Amino acid sequence: MKHFSGPWVIGLIMKTKTLFIAAVMGLGVSGVMFAADAAGESQKVQVKFVDAEKFSDVRDAYMPTEKGQAAYLDIIRQYVEEEAGRYVGDGQKLEINFTNIDMAGDFEPWHKPGMDDVRIIKDIYPPRMDLNFKLTDADGKVLKEGSRELRDLSFMMHLNLRRNDELNYEKEMLKNWIGKDIKSAKTG
């Protein structure tokens, strides 16, 4: 085995080490910038759940848990912030207040023992959401506002490529609403 020594080897090692550290720091900075971009998006879009404990159905089981409800509401919040944030322009602000949510499907524990935590998806249990929203510009001028009762009665007939995605029916309904009201406000 041949050994290399001398000042040029030490210089090469130092350059490689410096390049490696610079690359790692660059990735770290880009990660921070990405997180800042995501935080900026969520500041443009504010989602609130008004009296969430009274919502029709945001349950993780027939006998729901607060933790399960909080997790589902967090998924909805993150999705809306991300999806709507793509269309809310610089300086604009979107406020969305959900006043009711009824997730697709329902629990039917009477079928078999042990089915208490299995959500059955049938067309008789469509996703429903009621909300109020207001989109304002940098000066606080209202660009678009209103109340919406979102319903997707044909949710089971859509080609759904995200079948394994949690809350995919609710996300699809929200995506359609955001495209209709928020995206059109930006282009309109």
Image: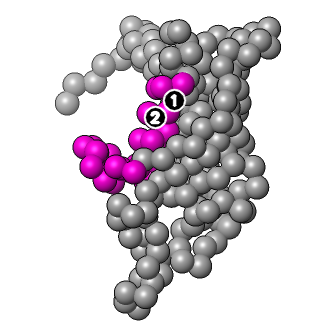
What's the residue at 22%, 25% (across, down)? 2
> Which of these two is toward me, 147 or 18?
147
Q: What residue sits right under mark 1 in the picture?
A: 178
- Is any part of residue 34 visible from this angle? no
Q: What residue sits right under mark 2 in the picture?
A: 175
Q: Are marks 2 and 1 in contact (CB under 8 Å)?
A: yes
User: Is residue 139 shown left or right of residue 125?
Assistant: right
Q: Regarding mark 2 in the picture, which secondary structure is present there?
A: helix
Amino acid type of the residue that numbered disc 1 sits on in the rendered structure = Ile
In the figure, residue 172 lies in which quadrant? top left
Residue 35 - label? none
Q: Quadrant of the N terminus?
A: top left
What's the residue at 60%, 38% (across, down)? 148
Residue 145, how many percent across, how many down? 68, 25
What's the residue at 40%, 12% (across, down)? 12
> Which region shows up in magenta?
153-181
Residue 119, how many percent across, how many down? 43, 70
Q: Is 162 covered by the magenta stretch? A: yes
Callout 1: few (<14), some (14-19), or many (20+) C-alpha neighbours within 10 Å?
some
Residue 55, how many percent across, how many down? 66, 60
> Which of these two is toward me, 35 or 181?
181
Amino acid type of the residue that numbered disc 2 sits on in the rendered structure = Lys
Seen in the picture, residue 1 relative to 49 is either above or below; the reply is: above
Give the alpha-carbon distance from disc 2 to disc 1, as whole Å: 5 Å
User: Is residue 22 shown left or right of residue 163?
Assistant: right
User: Is residue 170 shown left or right of residue 72?
Assistant: left
Residue 118, how many percent across, how many down? 42, 74
- Is any part of residue 64 visible from this angle? yes
In the figure, residue 41 lies in which quadrant? top right
